[in-house]
């Protein structure tokens, strides 16, 4: 097992696409549709708005993951195959928060 895994955007995409994991972790349940790129066309302003919405959704998932119960954290670490995990997100005050579990 690795020592620490930093849960980044790509890791969250993998977790969302794992049906078993996304069904057991409430932060991931039903999030797959949010990140589908169905409307990739449009103006630059629309693309920036979609990107901002995706960043906000991703930050919300990271915030939720940092507050998981001990059992769900253990399940997540087992899925990642690590002893410790780290989630980095931006709180409502705009500060970068790092949670290790």
Image (cartoon, helix red, strand yellow):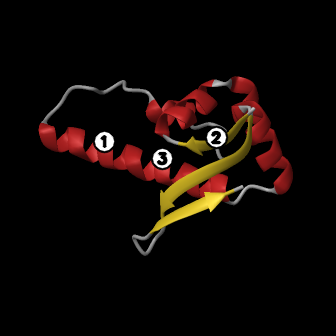
Is residue 16 something one can see in this rendering? yes
Q: SS for tag 2?
A: loop
* Mark earlier in primary sequence (2, 3): 2
Q: CA distance from mark 2 to mark 3?
A: 10 Å
Q: Is residue 58 above or below residue 97?
A: above
Q: CA distance from mark 2 to mark 1?
A: 19 Å
- Circle 2/circle 1 CB separation < 8 Å: no
Q: Is residue 19 above or below residue 63?
A: above
Residue occupying the point 70% across, 25% down: 19
Q: SS for tag 1?
A: helix
Q: Find disc 2 in the rendering and name its residue.
A: 28
Label 3: few (<14), some (14–19) or many (≥20) C-alpha neighbours in 10 Å: many
- Residue sitting at the far right: 71
Considering depth in this image, is 68 or 74 the residue closer to the camera? 74
**Image quarter for residue 11?**
top right
Q: Find disc 1 in the rendering and name its residue.
A: 50
Q: Find disc 3 in the rendering and name its residue.
A: 58
């Amino acid at each position: 097992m690795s020592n620490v895994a930093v849960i980044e955007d790509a890791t969250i995409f993998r977790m969302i696409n794992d049906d078993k994991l996304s069904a057991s972790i409430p932060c991931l349940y039903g999030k797959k549709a949010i990140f589908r790129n169905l409307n990739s066309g449009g103006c630059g302003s629309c693309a920036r708005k979609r990107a901002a919405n995706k960043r906000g959704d991703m930050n919300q998932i990271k915030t939720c993951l940092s507050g998981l119960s001990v059992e769900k954290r253990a399940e997540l670490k087992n899925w990642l195959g690590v002893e410790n995990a780290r989630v980095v997100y931006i709180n409502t005050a705009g500060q970068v928060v790092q949670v290790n579990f």
